[in-house]
Amino acid sequence: MSSQSRSKTRLSRALGIPLTPKAARYLEKRPYAPGEHGRTKRKADSDYAVRLREKQRLRAQYGLGEKQLRIAFNDAHRRAGMTGDNLVEALETRLDALVLRAGFARTTAQARQFVTHRHILVDGKIVDRPSFKVKPGQLIHVKPKSEGTEPFQVAAAGGHVDVLPKTPAYLEVEIDKLQARLVREPKRAEVPIQCETQLVVEYYAAR
């Protein structure tokens, strides 16, 4: 297993969520934190520790840096409605997140790599920013010259179906054509991530 895979697996075990398909298999075998004290029962975490871990879980599932998440939180807080729901719904319209949801990639890291390596088009134009906000009605598809490469051939054959969550209702996907359309804004209840967003809100509200 590569060092990157080991790192993701270790982080998955620490956070209690599978960040990659390989990490999901390890969590089934070792559903406890890494390290020599991982199996032992620890004393109850403080309120701060619980909120911090939830914030870290959200960060890890979208592959964000702390500065990126803080900016996204501030934007969500300024909007009307529930800040936690606003935050997740906004993050879910990121191009890399939708490339993953569409089944073009197997992991968040791979989705980001596809975008930065200029394999992904939005309405026919190359977009190489993973943070690009996709608008309802826009078409996401793989660049024609990239469609024949092995990773996309695997995706087009439905190779990631068994390891990814079911395609959410806000996304229409034609996987054999390697294209997907965001049909409407995501709703928090539909977004397939594990996170108690209120704890994330409380974490930032106290900072």
Image (spheres, helix red, strand yellow):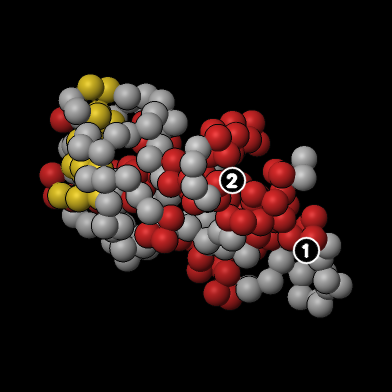
Identify the image quadrant of residue 192.
bottom left
Question: Residue 145 has which mark?
Answer: none
Residue lying furthest top: 125
Task: Identify whether 37 is placed above or below 199.
Answer: below
Between marks 1 and 2 in the image, the one whose residue lies nearer the viewer: 2
User: Where does label 1 land, which residue?
Assistant: 35
Query: Disc 2 on helix, strand or loop?
Result: helix
The count of marks equals 2
Left/right placement of residue 202 relative to residue 138 reads: right
Question: Residue 59 has which mark?
Answer: 2
Specify the quadrant that holds the N terminus: bottom right
Find residue 102 and report its horizontal and vertical position in percent. 28, 49
Left/right placement of residue 155 relative to residue 203 reads: left
Which amino acid lies under the numbered mark 1 shown in the image of this protein?
Gly
Task: Identify whether 31 is placed above or below 98.
Answer: below
**Residue at screen point 79% across, 60% down:** 47
Task: Identify whether 190 is placed above or below 111.
Answer: below
Left/right placement of residue 52 relative to residue 18 reads: right
Identify the image quadrant of residue 162.
bottom left
Q: Is residue 10 visible?
A: no
Find residue 70 and report its horizontal and vertical position in percent. 63, 35
> Dot 2: few (<14), some (14–19), or many (≥20) neighbours within 10 Å?
some
